Amino acid sequence: MSYQWDFSPVLTRWPLLLDGLLNTVKIAAIAIVFGVLVGLVLALLRLSPRRYLRLPAAAFVEFYRNTPPIVHFFWFFYALPVVLNISLDPLVAAVLALSTQSGAFYAEVFRGGIRSIERGQWEGAKALGMTHTQLMRRIVVPQAATRMIAPFVERSFELIKTTALASTLAYGELLYQAMMVNSETFRPLEVYTTVALLYLVLLVSCSALARVAEARLTAYR
Amino acid sequence: MPDPILPVSIPSVSPVPAAPPILQVSGLHKWFGPLHVLQGIDFSVAAGERVAIIGGSGSGKSTFLRCLNFMEMPTAGRIALDGTPLGRAVGKAAPGKPDEVRYPESELCRVRERVGMVFQQFNLFPHMTVLENAMEGLVTVKRMKKAEARERALRELDKVGLGGKTDVYPGRLSGGQQQRVAIARALAMEPEILLFDEPTSSLDPELVGEVLRVIRQLAEEGRTMLLVTHELGFAYHFATKVIFLADGVFHEVGTPDEVLKHPRQERTRAFLERFTEFSF
């Protein structure tokens, strides 16, 4: 192959890419926070003894599990404003899409973690006279939390990678900025290779952080 | 065969017939789906009584014990503590059916504080140390100050011989040690009645003795206890009253001598023979 690699036009535009990277981190962080909140609410609803609370939450999860993420982005950006008769900022639309998607999956992570705690733990706590709230707070959730870490991290990685779809809404995250750089430099090979490496570095550092957190939280085993 | 745990019977402390029952059960039924596990049980236990409940697997003995602190909800029947029936009858579920009884959570919690339980599988909290396990009920349920709870937890751990293991996580202990921690955890709550649900059934044979020794010690203190067990030798020395449960009813009730040595019911005899079949 006679192609001449030249990263310099890409690298000289590093402020654009850095900006994109920071926006990726920003949108991911916001979406994780809201996603966790959505997930907690959905998990509580799905664990409820009441059918009329359980079923809508289950339907919500099924909806997100069986529809493509990009459709959610388009729906929140192009469809929701029609319903509400407002226009949505790309960031807001992207966060809505990301946090509802990940919320649906986080809910399953939380629910699975709680249901994985053996019956004996619930009984041991009840036999001491604990209320449901006390036993959740003191016995079930602390143990479930450590089991949720791995699937939680996995879901969060999915979320971070899905932020690239926000580029379709012209939100200036990493991929969108890369497209800008590409249109200026016409160096797709260098641009998208750089972008891939940046995502790689971002996710590998996140996974190192997650391992440290997990080690701390599961020290008792 | 000499019994290394209990060479002599413990003098019964007080089953004075006049002592009012702490816990009273009437017409207790439990259904698991189509399965009629408890078929109408009347029972009461007074202060100082030690009741051993024996029976084959599936006889309902664990279910009966677990109904007493509402680990299982009775399908029908009432349980009274100090003469006051627990729960609130909310009218007939259907004509000819017994009253449906509802139990507010606060009431169940109060009962469980007074009626402690030791489980076959220990059910210690693996994310807490031995000391934290024993303190948990005191701090969370009784809202006791940490220092005070610690003191009482240490006292109970000492009693079960684990004063030296306070900062260890349960996962590092043998089954016998774990069960002794579980006993200390229950004791720390100072329950009026202690329920033991096959406390030695999941232990290796060589670890059974250390747990039974602790239970014997509690018997000597005159505690009110109910024990579901397959250790008939221990039951004989431990109990002031033995109940043979079969098919969800009390088949035979009496002193250890009456039930274990001179059973009147054919069913009881057949059950006991299975235990002595291979003894020497």
Image: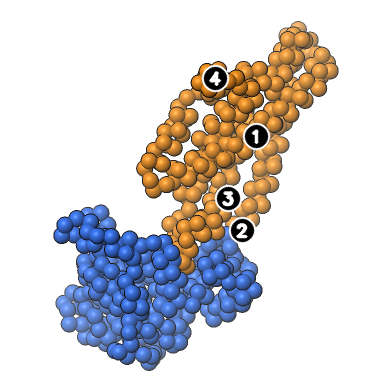
Chain colours: A orange, B blue
| Mark nearer the N terminus (1 vs 4) | 1
**Image mark for residue A146:** 3
Mark 4 residue crowding within 10 angstroms, few (<14) / some (14–19) / many (20+): few
Q: CA distance from mark 4 to mark 2?
A: 53 Å
Dot 4: chain letter: A
Tell me which chain the residue with mark 2 is part of: A
Q: Residues within 10 Å of mark 3 (few under 14, many from 20)?
A: some
User: Can you see residue A189?
Assistant: no
Compared to residue B192, the image places residue A216 above or below, namely above
Q: Which residue is mark 1?
A: A30
Front one among B199 and B145: B145
Instruction: Kindly identify the amino acid type of the residue bearing the numbered disc 2.
Output: Tyr
The residue pinned by badge 4 equals A85
Image height of A180 relative to A158, above or below = above
Instruction: Quote the CA–CA distance across marks 1 and 4.
Output: 25 Å
Which dot marks residue A220?
Answer: 2
Mark 2 nearby-residue class (10 Å; few <14, some 14–19, many ≥20)? some
Q: Type of residue at label 1? A: Ile
